[in-house]
Image (tube, grey):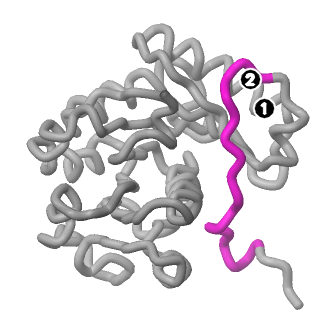
């Protein structure tokens, strides 16, 4: 079984800059062609580069989008609306949670632990890792992050996603090095499944041991967009 595609409740977490939101968007847009899909923006930490920014694109594809009250505003502490709890009783066949990627962000995840426990066999949590980012560049730091997320969020990590990249400057060697680090982390923690995500044009040049997950970039900052 591929936990990324074959699970009903997919929880994606990862530190700032890991690319978890990009992967959450890709997962939702891919799933919606075949299944009723909901994306839950549960990131209460990062006010930037959050999946809720692309709500219009998602809703046009029939994807339900739920996010903290006051998300995308200047309010410091977003509130979690009651509608989020409803996803555990809804008709959605695929629910993707985009969760803040440190132990503070995982606290929001822990709030729904009883519901996840009821759907244990239908739930999988992935930690997205970008080894080019601070705080996740080596095995010790990544392992520490994963353990803190698990403790606060009360969920076990089912698989890791190596999303090592440096934007448009990403080289195949970076992805391969990141994969080696993430595979070692998985072995240390007893995590059996690892995937490698990235732009298809880069992945096709890599020599990898893990299944690949091509992603399209949606969260491109305005200053990086080509001007007409």
Indicate left or right for 22 with 207 as reference. Answer: left
Instruction: Decide if residue 54 is in sight here.
Output: no
User: Do labels 2 and 1 touch, CB within 8 Å?
Assistant: yes
- The residue at 19%/55% (across/down) is 88
Circle 2 Cα neighbour tier, 10 Å, few/some/many (<14 / 14–19 / ≥20): some
> Where does the image place residue 205, in percent across and percent down from the top left?
90, 34
- The residue at 63%/39% (across/down) is 163
Circle 1 Cα neighbour tier, 10 Å, few/some/many (<14 / 14–19 / ≥20): some
> Where does the image place residue 169, in percent across and percent down from the top left?
84, 49
User: Which quarter of the figure is the C terminus placed in?
Assistant: bottom right
- The residue at 9%/42% (across/down) is 114
- Judging by the rendered image, the residue that carries numbered circle 2 is 177
Indicate left or right for 198 with 104 as reference. Answer: right
- Judging by the rendered image, the residue that carries numbered circle 1 is 174
Whether 142 is drawn above or below 74: the answer is above
> Where does the image place residue 111, in percent across and percent down from the top left?
13, 50
Nearest the viewer among 201 and 211 is: 211
């Amino acid at each position: 079984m591929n936990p990324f595609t074959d699970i009903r409740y997919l929880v994606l977490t990862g530190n700032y800059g890991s690319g978890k939101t990009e992967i959450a968007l890709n997962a939702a847009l891919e799933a919606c062609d075949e299944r009723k899909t909901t994306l839950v923006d549960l990131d209460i930490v990062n006010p930037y580069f959050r999946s809720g920014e692309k709500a219009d694109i998602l809703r046009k594809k029939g994807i339900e989008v739920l996010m903290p009250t006051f998300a995308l505003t200047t309010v410091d502490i977003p509130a979690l609306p009651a509608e989020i709890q409803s996803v555990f009783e809804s008709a959605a066949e695929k629910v993707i949670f985009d969760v803040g990627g440190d132990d503070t962000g995982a606290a929001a995840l822990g709030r729904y632990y009883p519901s996840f426990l009821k759907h244990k066999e239908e739930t999988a949590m992935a930690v997205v890792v970008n080894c080019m980012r601070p705080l996740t560049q080596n095995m010790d730091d990544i392992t520490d992050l994963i353990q803190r997320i698990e403790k606060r969020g009360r969920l076990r990590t089912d698989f890791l996603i190596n999303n090592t990249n440096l934007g448009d400057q990403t080289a195949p060697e970076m992805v391969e090095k990141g994969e080696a680090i993430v595979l070692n982390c998985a072995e240390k923690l007893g995590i059996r499944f690892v995937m490698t995500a990235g732009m298809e044009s880069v992945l096709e040049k890599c020599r990898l041991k893990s299944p690949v997950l091509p992603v399209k970039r949606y969260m491109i900052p305005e200053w990086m967009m080509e001007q007409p």
